[in-house]
Image (tube, rainbow, N blue to C red):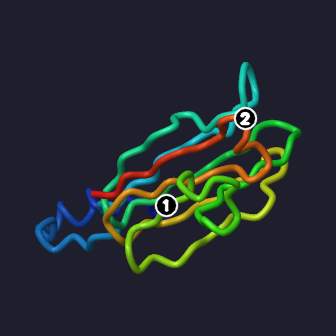
Amino acid sequence: MFDRRTFAQLLAAFGVSAAMPAWAQAKTVDVTMKQSPKMRFLPETVTVKAGDTVKWTNPYNISHTVTFDPAKAADKANAVLPAGVEPFDSGAVEEEGTFSHTFTVKGTYKYVCVYHENMGMIGTVIVS
């Protein structure tokens, strides 16, 4: 199978670059769940375009969550969604686990780790 770049190059060779589907231009942005020197998402804020995916990775042996649900946040101001977006949550992300979400609605999304929100583990995704 071709990766996206090879696929795009192949299409360009046949003169179809102007007809590239939107998914071929989407990207994935990585966020790491850190626990030292403090619990946090790194980077704490990412900016993506609509259609891009954010992938969170937990390299540590302490469980974390990626929670975009004000009802599950200790402080509802730490979990904010654009109008019309349904809340979502990764559930527990264990050691070496990942969680990915593709953002399709523009706006600012604030999220927390429900286990470590009180320790400042709060993040933001800005979708343009």
Q: Which mark is residue 80?
A: 1
In the rendered structure, which amino acid carries the disc numbered 1? Val
Q: Quadrant of the C terminus?
A: bottom left
Does label 1 or label 2 sit earlier along the sequence?
Answer: 1
In the displayed structure image, the side of residue 18 where residue 45 appears, left or right: right
Specify the quadrant of the image occupied by residue 15: bottom left
Residue that appears at 11% across and 68% down: 18
**Depth order, front residue of 108/27:** 108
Residue labelled with disc 2? 119
Local packing at callout 1 (Cα closer than 10 Å; few below 14, some 14-19, many 20+) is: many
Location of residue 93 in the rendering, given as x and y in whole percent from the top left corner: 78, 54
- SS label for mark 1: loop
Location of residue 59 in the rendering, given as x and y in whole percent from the top left corner: 76, 38
In the displayed structure image, the side of residue 52 where residue 38 appears, left or right: right
Specify the quadrant of the image occupied by residue 3: bottom left
Q: Looking at this view, name the residue that lies furthest to the top.
A: 37
Location of residue 61 in the rendering, given as x and y in whole percent from the top left corner: 88, 39
**Depth order, front residue of 96/83:** 83
Local packing at callout 2 (Cα closer than 10 Å; few below 14, some 14-19, many 20+) is: few
Residue that appears at 59% across and 60% down: 100
